[in-house]
Every structure is written in structure tokens, then in C-alpha cells.
Image (tube, rainbow, N blue to C red):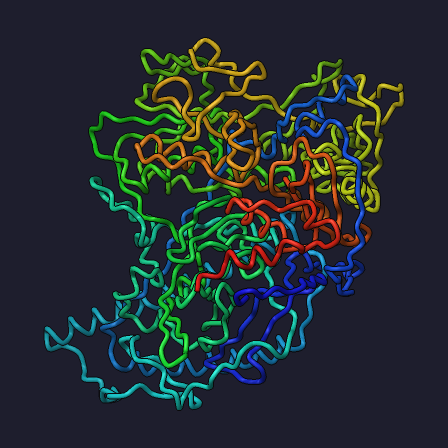
Amino acid sequence: MGKGQSKSYDFTGESVKKRSGSKKSNGVEARTSKNIDPDSVNSGKSENVDCTPINRTSLPVTKEEPINDSSAHAQENSNAVSGEQNTTTTKNSEESSETNNIDDSKDSVNANNSSEENSETSKTVNSEETTLKVEDQKEEKSESETLEQGPLEEEDLDKDVQNQAEEPQKEAEDLKENQKEAEESEVKNTEEEETGEGPEDTNKEPPSEEPSSVDNKEEEPADNTEEVPPDTTEEVPPDTTEEEPADTTEEEATIADDSQPDNTEQTEDQEEPDQGEPVQVVTDGVGVEQQEDSVEDMADTVSAVVCRESDLKDGEMKEFDLGDGKVLVVREGPEFHALGSKCTHYGAPLINGSHCNGRVRCPWHGACFSVKTGDIEDFPGLDSIPKFKTEVKDGNVKVTASKSALADPKVQRNMCKAAKPSDKKVLIIGGGPSSVTCAETLRQEGFTGEITIATQENNIPYDRPKLSKALDMTADKIALRSLDFYTKADINILKQKQATAVDTSSKTVTFKDGSTESYTSLVVATGGRPRVLPIPGTDLENVYQLRTPEDANQIAEKAAGKNVVIIGSSFIGMEVASALAGTAATVSVVDIIKVPFQLVLGEKVGSVLQKMHEDNGMKFYFERGIKEFVGSDGKVTEAVLSDDTKLPADVCIMGVGVVPATDFIKDSGIDMTNRGFIPVNKMMQTNQSDVYATGDIVEFPLFSVGDQKVNVQHWQMAHAHGKTAALGILGKDEPIRSVPFFWTVQYKKSIRYTGYGPGYDDIIVHGDLDAPKFIAYYTKGDEVVAAASLNFDPFVSRIADMMLAGEKILKSEVQSSADGWMSRFEKLSIKA
């Protein structure tokens, strides 16, 4: 938006693709950030389609009187036992960070065929001709396609998603194989020339002094520096005419390609490690700006004018096709930046997110990337996005990128290796996201000492939030990194290591198996453990708590065709209910509150979720607790409620929150609260020197509430804690500054939430709760302290950016209009 401009945001649940009129430029299409909604893509469920435009200035407004207790959801479920409301703000164990897992490292393709014979160049020209024709066919087809509402979510994690995740990997492997054959052929020819053996190639074409043209479209020059001549490039007019549905990716259906790229060149603002050998865990990710000058291989390079300089206003971002991939172009003042178009967490299209103060924020889960470097600066996720070379000349914006980076747009920063021997040792207890982020940050920042992650599980760190959304997922499929990744980075993983004691004087940790580990710096990141109900029958067979992939797999197996009773109606309970819909014979949910998520989201939003579940066959038993589980032959057969209602139960699941797993530090001298949380400062330091704590177990100063110490059990926040702790260990203090952001996925619908809501005193809802398509503002006094939405992107991601910038949204700004604050947000993105 230009200076002083504001507009009414009209999100209708349809994604909009703004094309370059009726013209093309090198197969480039433009998409804008207007009217985007990734929740509007539904696989095979067209009954939810609602294309009625919403007028943001005349949306129905509803108010809800808040309940007195606004504590977080983890504590609300514990009340199923006693009927008393708990006021703690503990989040659900799904969001806890004790153990998570690793994405397999995947080698990106590094093409280097600059010395190939001229016959290979001729083949490239023919390949380009075929590519251009395919692009034309794709464009014609895309003009007639429309999107259905309701995205595929995380529970669609196995078949369609796995195939989709493997497609770019297959393309990259094919390209790598072709290049390998070409290199072998070149070596063979070179040997023949040196020995004088081998017949002369009489069919070899003479060298061509100028690049060939195909269908009047210029072939890229070998040095990738020549500007596209004006007479061969059609000018891309401003995108203000035709609008079509955009090609959005399927939300959270992406399993986040299990094979991750292993390494890339160092980003611009990365400090060069002073010692230690860099870990070559990825191949050259050509397309990162620092690598552009070394691009020599045309076979792996695509370059095109994607738009006119005037097509993007200051602060605006648009998505363009480039070769077989897409790039996100962001304008900040006179500067243009071209980036990878998808978030590296679950593959969300970043065009649907938010751009503010030099960052692009993911619309789904809030990860942030620098527009100048592509570095990931806030979480969740571990990888950065590629940064491509951008040139502006004669009003044209030209982008040059590697095809392999477009096909697999995940970038890992260079990591040093350990120097042996070393007198420095960082011991991290716990296998969650903060542990992985901490270890990786240490290596990225040049730490050459020993790093050990000790987890009590028998799995390497995995993506825990997926457990309740896709119960059949195995640990290896949702690993955050591969074991090979840790090996190459000299990060030791110790499994089945449950800590039992910490001695801060001798700087040692003792484990349940009797072994000990020493440290020079200790990070406690043990997360939470599921709360056990103090009632009879919890030891019966088929009574479960969901904590590990093995737990999830057993629930999925035993629940098929059976009667399931779930205790608790917050994150784990409701996501498991959604996952079991259609597979279990019956699913009954028990809780003492009135609606699901009541304490976190309020009654009106909770009622939306309740109806969603009831429409899928769930039965609710609210305002009552659980008295006991009854069994026969050691197996549960019945759940008896507090009012003596008896529910048939073949499988029971207790989703009643978590408690911090910190008992082992009680005699260590490390301060703890009476609830078992560890208070830390802005650098995640405890009261003991060289001891840090991160994740669900800490109370830390949250900047957005005046540095009040809070407990936030979000997957995203745990990542941020790990990075901050690592920088603190290295003496590079960077105080924690992250806006809480969480999500829940049920029936392929995703509710996104940002801010810190405990203590809210009013809720203002805009939109249509029946559609459902809404945004709910949680206010305290005259200030908006949190927001939740469904089918209302990119509001929540933009609100998070407002909060990060220190800008308060006032209650008066959202009383009559959902976007009363939007004009202030737009000014934050304007640099000129």
C-alpha cells in the first residue's frame, strides 16, 4: 500500500490470483496478497463452500461476557476430576516440548555443468522449448480452475501429502542423475582426448556465439548476467485487472518433506565461525544471494523478468511463477527482494501471510523470515528460505534462481563441527524443539565444543503436535532431523536417558540408568508429563495418555470400530476426537466446562467447535467429571461419570493437561515455583550460573505484557527459547522477544491464535460463526490482548506483527469493524 492508503479487507474464503492482464512475460504470472485464505481449500468437501463476500465495515458483531477464570487449556482439563476450575495457564501436552523429532536431511541438487560440450547446450535449448510449452498449457488450465473451501490439514499426513512432499525430491534426484551422467560422459571424453583414443564426433555442432531463441523467447545467457532485451520481453502491466483463484497449497496436509536439505551457503548476516570445520550437510543451494556470483551452470539456473518496478507498491509482496517454481517478491522502498515462496515448516504459501518491518510471517503458524537474507527469525520450523538474485533495470525486475532451490526451497545455515578435544560441553536435557533449536544455533554461531541432547524417549526429536492430529504417524516420519544430520553436525543424541538429579556444584547430571554426564553449560528442556487422574481404573488396559508416537499408534489401532471415551475437551481431547471420527464406533467427550476450549477461546468460539464435532458424530457430556474406569479381565469396559452416568468404553484417553517434568531438580539449588515451573530471565538463565531452562517448564518475561513472567506452552515459543538460550551460552545476549502463536486443526479446519489472553474481560467477534468464518478479539480493558480466527487470514499473522512491533490494537478499533487497525499496520511496511 502506498503512504496514507487504506482499504477495506474483503476476505470471502477464496484465494485470488491477480494475473498480468492477458499477457505473459517468460511464463511469469503474478499473484498478490489481497483476498487470500488458505483455509478455503477443501479436499472433496464442497458443502462448506461459502463465496459470499464479507464487508469488513458491516460484519455482525457479537460480544461475550468472559468467564472469571481465563487460564490456559492444559489446566482446564484437570478439572474433570474435582469439578473445580484451575487458574494456571499451562498448555496442552501436545504443545509441550519434551521430545520432538527430526526431518531427514536431504541433499539439494548442485548442478555444475559449465564445462559441458556444446552439444549439451543444444539439448538445454530443446529442454527450454518444451518447458515453455508446458508452462503455456499450465496457464491455460489454471484459468479455468477454482478452489473449494476448507484446507486439507495435518491429519492428511500419509498418502496424498507424502506423494506431494516427494515430488520435488524426485525432480531434484532426476536432475542430479542427469547431471551425473553428463559429468561421467565429459570425463570419458576428456580421457579420450588426452590419450588420442576414441572416434571424432562428426555430428558435433560448432560453437554458437549467441544463445538460441525458442518461440521468440530468449534462452538464458551462459553467464546469467545479460539483461533480457526489451524486444524479446513483454512488459508486465500492473496487476489491477483480472482476478482468479490463487493456487494455494494444502494447509498442514504437507508432512513437511521428511527429507530436508542438509546445508547451504552462509547467509549475509551470519557470523563466520572462528574455528571448526563447516558441516557440509547440504549441497550448494544456488539461489542464496551469497552464491549468486558463483552460478555457472545454466542447466540449474532460470532467469526472467517477473514484473515491472511499478507493479509493486512500497511494502507490497507478490508471488510470481519462475520456471517450474514460484518466487515471492517483496518491495521495501526502492529495494526488491526475491525469496522462496513457501514456509519451511509445513509449506504454507507466504503470499497469504504478513509482511512487516523486514520480515515475512507465515499465515498458518507464525514463522518469520528475513526479506534481506531469507533467514528464519521466528518459529516454528528449523530451516530458512532461499534468497534469490534480483536486478532492477529499465523498470524491469529480473530474478535469477537455481532450479533445485525452487524445487526444494529449504535452506540450512552453515554449521561448524566440534574441535576435539574441547573443554566446553553443552548438555541439553530433553528432546523437544527448544533442544534442537538450541543445538543447531550453537553450531551455526561457531560453537566448537561438545553438544549432547539427552532424551528419555527411544526416538530422536520429532514433531509432537502431529501426534494428536494423525495418530498413525510413526516417529521416523515426523522426525525433525535425521540421525545422519546430528552425526554430521557433531551433535550427540542419547536416548532412553531420564534425568534423576542435577549437581550444580560438580556440574553433573545423573540419569535413571545410573550413568552421569558432565557439562560446562546445562539446558533443562524436559517439557511436561501427562497429568494422571487420581481415580480408580487408570491402570486398566486400553486407558491411555497421549505423549509418544507409540501411544498414538496404539490408540489408533485399539480404537478402530470401538467405543471411545475422551476425558478433557481442550487440544489433545478435541484433536484426537477429530482424528478418530469415522474410524471409532462411538466417541464420547467428558468435561466439567460448558463447551470445548471454553477457558481459552470462550463460549461462542467453543460452541463453533462443538457443533463441528457433533456434525461428525461426537457426543459431549459437559458439566460433569469422571468418577472411575471400570474393567473386566484387566481391560476397561466402562467410564462412570460424576453423576453416575455410565458410558461403554473399549478405549479411554485422558487429555487432562500436563505438569512440568522438573521433579529431578528439586535438590539442585535451581529455583522453582510451587507449581514446579523454573523462573528464568530474558536470556533463559536460571538463578544458577551456566544453567538455562527452556520450553513448557519455564516462566519467562513476556515483552508484550510488560515483562511479566508467564508460562506459555506453545510449540512456536519453545523454538524461540532454544535459540535465545544458545546465544546466551555464547555470550551473544539477544533477549527473548516473540509473540505467542498457536493453532489447532480439527476436521480440516484450522483455528489460529496469537497473543497472551489469560485475564481477558471481553470478546468481540466479527464474521459468521455458522459459516464458520470469523475473527475473535480478546480484550482486557481498552486493549486487544489476543485474537483467534478461522478462515480469516491473514488477520492473525498481521496482529502478531503489530504486537511484535510494540503497536497496541485498541478495543475501540475493533468494536464496529474487524479491520479498524489495518491502516496502521500498512504503514509499518512502508519504507520509502
Q: Position of residue 19 (x, y in %)?
A: 58, 76
Above or below, comparing residue 18 to residue 424 in the picture = below
> Which image quarter is the N terminus in?
bottom right
Q: Position of residue 601 (x, y in %)?
A: 72, 38
Q: Position of residue 598 (x, y in %)?
A: 75, 34
Determine whether, in the image, residue 209 is placed left or right of residue 611: left
Above or below, comparing residue 156 to residue 726 in the picture = below
> Which image quarter is the C terminus in?
bottom left
- Residue 42 location, quadrant: bottom right
Q: Nearer the viewer, residue 285 or 487?
A: 285
The answer to whether residue 339 of the structure is visible from this angle is yes
* Residue drawn at x 56%, y 55% as measured from the top left: 825
- Residue 653 location, quadrant: top right
The answer to whether residue 106 of the structure is visible from this angle is no
State the residue lying farthest toward the left. Answer: 195
* Residue drawn at x 80%, y 54% as measured from the top left: 60
Q: How many marks?
A: 0
* Residue drawn at x 65%, y 21% as measured from the top left: 531
Above or below, comparing residue 319 to residue 90 in the picture = below
Determine whether, in the image, residue 121 is placed left or right of residue 316: left
Above or below, comparing residue 822 to residue 293 in the picture = above
Q: Nearer the viewer, residue 652 or 520?
A: 520
* Residue drawn at x 64%, y 65% as measured from the top left: 7
Q: Position of residue 610 (x, y in %)?
A: 80, 41
Q: Nearer the viewer, residue 52 or 544?
A: 52
Determine whether, in the image, residue 233 is placed left or right of residue 647: left
